[in-house]
Image (tube, helix red, strand yellow):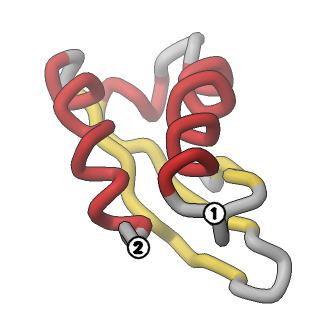
Amino acid sequence: MIDINQALEKIRPGLQQDGGDVEVVSFEEKTGVLQVRFTGHCATCPFAQQTLKQGIEKTLKEMVPAVKSVELIK
């Protein structure tokens, strides 16, 4: 099974192309909640929440069944 970091490596190139990135803050196995932080341009992007839910969360939930939701920590 693919892990969270492996899945993020598939997402990162798109973020890095725009001058940003994402990093894992924590993962709660019991609840399946992954907390992430945007860095670079992603941290101040007005579309950050949309990127989080429609891009990162959707992809991670498909690739890592243990992930139930992704939350943004600032």
Residue for badge 2: 1
Which residue is at a point 38% across and 58% down the rendered structure image? Answer: 23
Q: Residue at x 32, y 37 (%)?
A: 11
Which residue does the numbered mark 1 point to in the structure image?
Answer: 65
Inspect the image, locate mark 2, and give the three-letter code of the amino acid beneath it: Met
Callout 1: SS: loop
On screen, 36 above or below 56? below
From the top left corner, tell me how far across and down residue 31 is, in percent. 84, 77
The residue under the point 53% across, 61% down is 64
Q: How would you rate the neighbour count of disc 1 (Cα within 10 Å): few for under 14, some for 14-19, many for 20 or more?
A: few
Location of residue 23 with respect to 19 vertically, above or below: below
Can you give x and y, in whole percent of width and height, for residue 48 in the image? 56, 24
Res. 73 image quadrant: bottom right
Q: Is residue 19 left or right of residue 65?
A: left
**Is 40 placed left or right of 70 in the picture?**
left
Amino acid at the residue labelled 1: Pro
Circles 1 and 2 in contact, beta carbons < 8 Å:
yes
Across and down, in percent, residue 5 comes to: 33, 66
Quarter containing the N terminus: bottom left
Q: Where is 34 relative to 9, above or below? A: below
